[in-house]
Each structure stands twice: as structure tokens, then as C-alpha cells.
Image (spheres, helix red, strand yellow):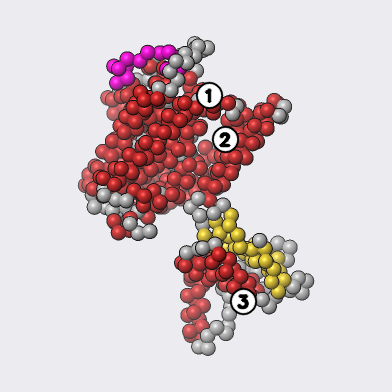
Amino acid sequence: MTQKFQADELSKALEYTSSCLEEMKLSAKDRVRSELMCEEALVSLMNHADFTKRSTFSVNVRKFFGDVVIDFAVPGEEFEFSGGTGIQSLKDDDDLQESYEAIRNIVLRSFSGNIRYKHSGNLNTVRIKAVRSNYSGLYKTLAALFLAVVAGVILRNFAPTNVSIFVNNNILDPIRTVFLNGLKMCAVPIVFFSVVSCIADMGGLSGMKKTGGRLFRYFAASQILGLTVGLCLMYIFRPGEGVNIPVTSGETVQTQSLSFIGMLTNLVAGNVIRPFLDGDMLQIMVLAFFVGLAISLTDAKILRKVSSELNVVFMKITEIFLYLTPLVMFCSAASMIITAGAGTLVSAAGITLTLIFGHVVILVLLCMAVKFRANLNPFMMLRKSAPMLATAFSTCSSIAAIPDSMKCSDAMGISPSLYSFSVPVGVSVSKITTPLFYAVTVLSAANLYGVNITPSAIIQLSVTILLLAVTTPSMPGGGVISLSVLLSQAGCPLEFVGIALSLEMIIDFTATMTICQGNLVCTLLAAADDNLLDREKYNRP
């Protein structure tokens, strides 16, 4: 709600702002910081105010998707807003006055990212984000999801068919495609430069042996855990059993060789450029490993710094794309309803619930591992993981959650030498829900189409699933890309891929959250084993 004040009521406006912040129950630290920003901003606006045509100014304090936002609007000509107030009479001593002003301006500039100035129509406005909620992105995404369901149902059931198709093909789908292309554009350089800089900073093979040994064992254990949970849930719930859907397509697939030796020989690319063109993450990581090792052995400090700086740049580009998340969520959900119908959600309910329940089981097991393996409070881990989980849920992309994953790792007290390596590598090689997804969908397809799978065939499928899980792209829809190989190996019709694509779109929210949490737990356990964890910082609220 906007409150108006007279030109001489500066103190009253600041008192009103302070009382609003107190009513919103901000912490003492956030309230003091916000009051300082408000005082500096409003005094600066008043020093350039012009009340000849308008005798009042306005203050608006509100919550917006969890953020606490303060707006000041003061009439006046445009000026260069720098945060300095120009107060001349706060101190009697000039030296003390200058020191006082310098300190206040330093504090204000440190929070400059929370302040925005704008001039329009003889009105100077300043917006201050007093508190940035970790859940604001999630709230916006859920709101976008609700609006998408409404829009999708209206377009599918009430709008002419040509109109709904036009909207989907020319508006919704292109926006989603641009977003996904942006994430894919950043994925390769983020993984490459992160691995290069980390290997170089760790001191080559000796540092890798100490830092990465336990980490990769935990990554491998998480993949096996996901597969085991999937197989167990299939034999408990048996979704799709007894339905016997008739096969309507004779489509076949060219299976690919997935032998262990073949995968090993393919790790090293034939040339330097090909892995980047093909987006082959395993080859890129191997190349990055050798580049980082060479930088470490030659002590090329300039290249080490350049790789670190480029990693920061592409991280920032990813964050820029994340601002489009609510819009992309709206487009994706509305497009799914227009093309497949809301009934798609109902028809695959059994398989969907099995997968989501599997994600819950995995999260519980991860918390138990943190408690009993590392002797840490798992609820503290979940609380500090909230920003990462919100981003993962909103974007359905573990790549997009890399910046928040690193911030959460740092908040938990994990050594930067470990998490700066484990987070980008884990995105590519450790996707704990992917084996679960493959196991449940393939065996559900067998139940739906009446295909009998013997125990020996399940063992062979399990090996293939673990190999495919490593190479599955870390992006929305990535799990379906390799599913056709498994369907062919199990003797199931490929038309099930269409159902699986809808399934993955539904469960991608919880799946990506579980993947990010699984990678974070692997990093946390490895840090605890190798004394790379600050337990005091972990337990600090």
C-alpha cells in the first residue's frame, strides 16, 4: 500500500518505513541494513526534489513473491544517483564528517545490487529490495504453472484449432527453444572451464587423488542407489500391469553398441574440436582434465586465471537466462496441454506417482547417509539447499542450478577446492534419478504391452542403464533421448517414447531437485571423509 507524505516529512517517512519492516518481522541484521539503504536513498532523492508542482512524495513497502520491496517516488529533475547524501551537518568535525560519509557510502555501495534508480515524468523513483527471498523464483514459477494450465485448457478446448496450433508453434515453442538453447550454449564451457581451473588449482594428479577419489566412489554409489530403488518400486507397485495396450506402430530403432570397452576407447576424441561440436560431455571432461593437468605441470598462471575468469562469465550468462524461467515454465506447460491434453496427466498417473515416490525415497536415503555416514544434521543441509532446490525445480535443469549449487556448498562449509570441481562434474556423470527413470519406464512399458522380461534380461538392462545414465544430457527431455535404446533391448515398441516424454515433463521438477541434492550429498560426504568440511560453518544457522 502506498503512503504519501508532505515535503517536510522526511523523518516521518523513514519512521513509517522502519515500522513496516518491523511488522514484516525481518531479522535485526536485514532491518538495520535496509533502514540504512532507505535513509541514504531517500535523503539523496530529497536533495534533488522539486515540489513546485507536486507537494507530496510517496513510500510503498510490500512483499512481492517473498521479496521485501521498498519504493520511494519523489518529484524532481533527473540526476546521477550514486548513493551519496551530501549531508553537511551531521558532525561538527569536518574530518569526522568525511570519514562518516565515506563509511556510509561504502556500506551503501556494497548493497548497490539491491537498489534501482529511475526517472520518468518529472518523478525520481528508487526501488530497494530489502530482502531477497530464496523462494521468490519458485513462487513465480508456480504462479506461471497455474496460469499455463488455465491458458492451455482454454486454447485446447475453446479456441479454434488453427489458433491454438499457431500460438503453440509460433509463440510458446520458440520461447522454450531459445531458453533451452541458451542453457545448452553455456553447458559445455561451464563444464570445460570449471574442470580445467579446478585440476590446475588442485595441483594435478596428487591433488586429484586426494580430492576426487572418494567423490567418484560416492557418484558411482548414487547411480546404483537410483537403479536399486527403481527396480524395488517396480516389483512393489507394478504400474501398467494387466493393461495390454495394442501396438499401433511398427517403428524400430538402430541399437548402438554400449560395451564397456567401447565406452572407454571413445573417451578420448579424435580431434580437439569434435567434442565441442557434438556436445559429448565425457570427451569434453577428459580433454579438460588433460588441459588442467598440463597447466598445473607447466605452471601457466595466465591460462589458469583466464580459465577461472571465463568460468565466472559463463556462470553469469546462465544466471541471466534464469530470469526467463517463469515465462519458459508458462510456455512449456501450456504447450504440453495444447498438444497432448490435460488427460495425459491422468493416463500416466500410476507411472508418474511411482517415479515421484522414488524421488522421495531417494531423498530420505540421502538424508540418512548424511546423518549416519557423516554424523551431520540432514535438516540443516536441506535448509541451506533451499535456493538450489528452488532453482532446480523451476528450471528442470541441473546445469542451470550450478551457480546455486556452489553457493549452497559454500554455505555448508565445503572447501571450494572440492565443490568447484564436484558440482560441474557431478552434473555430467552423476544423475541419481536417471537410472530410476529408465528402470521404471522400461519395465512399465513391458507391463503395458504385455512383454515378458526374464531375470537375466533385467540384469543386462541394469548394466545398460548404468552406462546410459552417465551419457544422458543434463537438460529437460534428456532422459528420453537414450530411452529408445532400452526399449529396443527389452523388446518394447518405440511408440512408448511419446508417453515417456510426457512423463518426464511431469516429473522433471522433482527429478532435477533430487539429482542436485544427490550430487550435493556426494560432495558433502566426500568433504567429511577428507577433512574438507568446516563443521562449525555447516551447523551455523
Q: Secondary structure at mark 1?
A: helix
Estimate the spatial distance between the alpha carbons at disc 1 and disc 3, rounded to whole Å. Answer: 62 Å
Q: Which residue is labeled 1 in the image? A: 347
Label 1 neighbourhood size at 10 Å, few (<14), some (14-19), many (20+)?
Answer: few
Cα separation, mark 3 vs mark 2, equals: 49 Å
Question: Image quadrant for the N terminus?
Answer: bottom right
265 or 391, nearer to the observer: 391
Q: Residue furthest bottom?
A: 92
Position of residue 241 measured from the top left corner of the image (x, y, whole percent): 43, 18
Q: Residues within 10 Å of mark 3 (few under 14, many from 20)?
A: few
Question: In terms of image quadrants, where is residue 291?
Answer: top left
Lateral position of residue 61 relative to residue 268, left or right? right
What residue would you read off at disc 3? 11
Residue drawn at 43 percent across, 47 percent down: 388
- Type of amino acid under label 1: Ser
Label 2 Cα crowd, 10 Å radius (few <14 / some 14-19 / many 20+): many
